[in-house]
Image (spheres, rainbow, N blue to C red):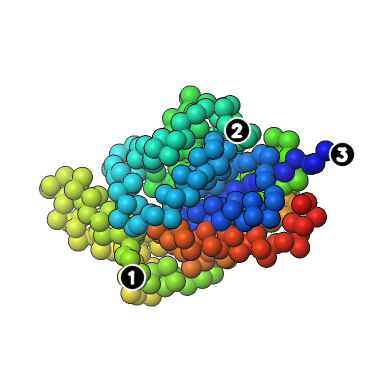
Amino acid sequence: MTRARIGLALGSGAARGWAHIGVLEGLKAVGLEPDIVCGTSMGALVGGAYAAGCFPALQDWARALTWRIAVRLLDVRLSGGGLIDGGEIVTLLETLGITCDMEQTGKPFAAVATSLVTGREIWLRSGSLSGAVRASIGIPGIFKPVKHGDDWLIDGGLVNPVPVSLCRALGAEIIIAVNLNSDLVGRRFEITNMPRQDGPVGLMSPELVGRLLEQVPKAWRDQAAQIAPRLLPAQSVVPAYFDVLANALNIMEDQITRTRLAGEPPHVLLAPRLGHIGPFEFHRAAEAIAEGRASVEQAMPYLRRYL
């Protein structure tokens, strides 16, 4: 008898996506290696690195990431339909060695994006791997959309946050899925706003807001500077702008995930506990990775039947 083909569906979750590294480490430790990998958003980034054989480089880079480095990756541009251009992300992928086409990866891999024109789910299965990852991580309103033929692509989490269906379409017979957003809805805003010893990060950082102000025309800069503090987390019961944006996306993705998983359930669902990590706290990779490994250990009663 031949072993059933195992597919791994890595879900969306912004900075919480580093937990996928821990999941892959945990699965390897118990002798489970996926034959097919599919990813949405950060799941596409980690899954793409794994399929391309660049996983060790990504592991080392993520664990060494600081909030200052993370902020430098966010190339702010007040044009093109998003605050962040995303060119620095593509450069990072190439630095890590993720330069091949998707047809050349060691394992079958595909990513999910969303058509901004039609709203349809787009499965990216060929062409540039780094380009597919960049399209899949395009959080609307934050990252600039990616041109794809006659279409514009944004984050795949809008339509398929945990791509079980894509894994099945690629031939997976046993599917392990990772849902990073299972415990986000309902938590208090103060959880993500608590100050960290190693500083703020991403869209929550004064550094990034300062770079935004530099691109505002001088005639409007003074007024913009007065508005800017309202975008940042405050010690207040009133949520700041980016709090509202991040949590609205959490609610939307949670509802879509529940619906999709009910209709397309995986054989094993891993749900790392990541509610304490904000969507833009990319410097907290070590914590997210540890939670990913823990989710594999907790699911061992279900995973043993496939060993």
Q: Choose between 58 and 77: the one closer to the eye.
A: 58
Which amino acid type is shown beneath numbered disc 3? Answer: Met
Q: Is residue 97 left or right of residue 235?
A: right
264 on left or right of 154: right
Nearer to us of marks 1 and 2 is: 2
Q: Is residue 123 above or below residue 241?
A: above
Tell which circle, 1 or 3, labels the residue nearer the N-terminal end. Answer: 3
Q: Which mark is residue 1?
A: 3
Residue 273 shows in the view: yes
Residue at (46%, 31%) from the top-left corner? 99
State the CA–CA distance, disc 3 to disc 2. Answer: 24 Å
Q: Earlier in the sequence, mark 3 or mark 2?
A: 3
- Asked whether, in this view, residue 305 is left or right of residue 124, the answer is right
Q: Is residue 272 visible?
A: no
Residue type pointed to by label 2: Gly
> Outermost residue, left direction?
219
Quadrant position of residue 191? bottom left
Residue 301 location, quadrant: bottom right
Q: Which residue is mark 1?
A: 197
Circle 2 — which element? loop
Task: State which tag comes first along the sequence, 1 or 2.
Answer: 2
The residue sitting at 39% across, 47% down in the picture is: 142
Amino acid type, residue under disc 1 in the picture: Gln
The answer to which quarter of the image holds residue 91 is top left
Cβ–Cβ under 8 Å for marks 1 and 3: no
Q: Nearer the viewer, mark 1 or mark 3?
A: 3
Of the numbered discs in the image, which one, if any, rests on residue 106? 2
Q: Secondary structure at mark 3?
A: loop
CB of mark 3 within 8 Å of CB of mark 2? no
Residue at the spot x=76%, y=46% of the render?
174
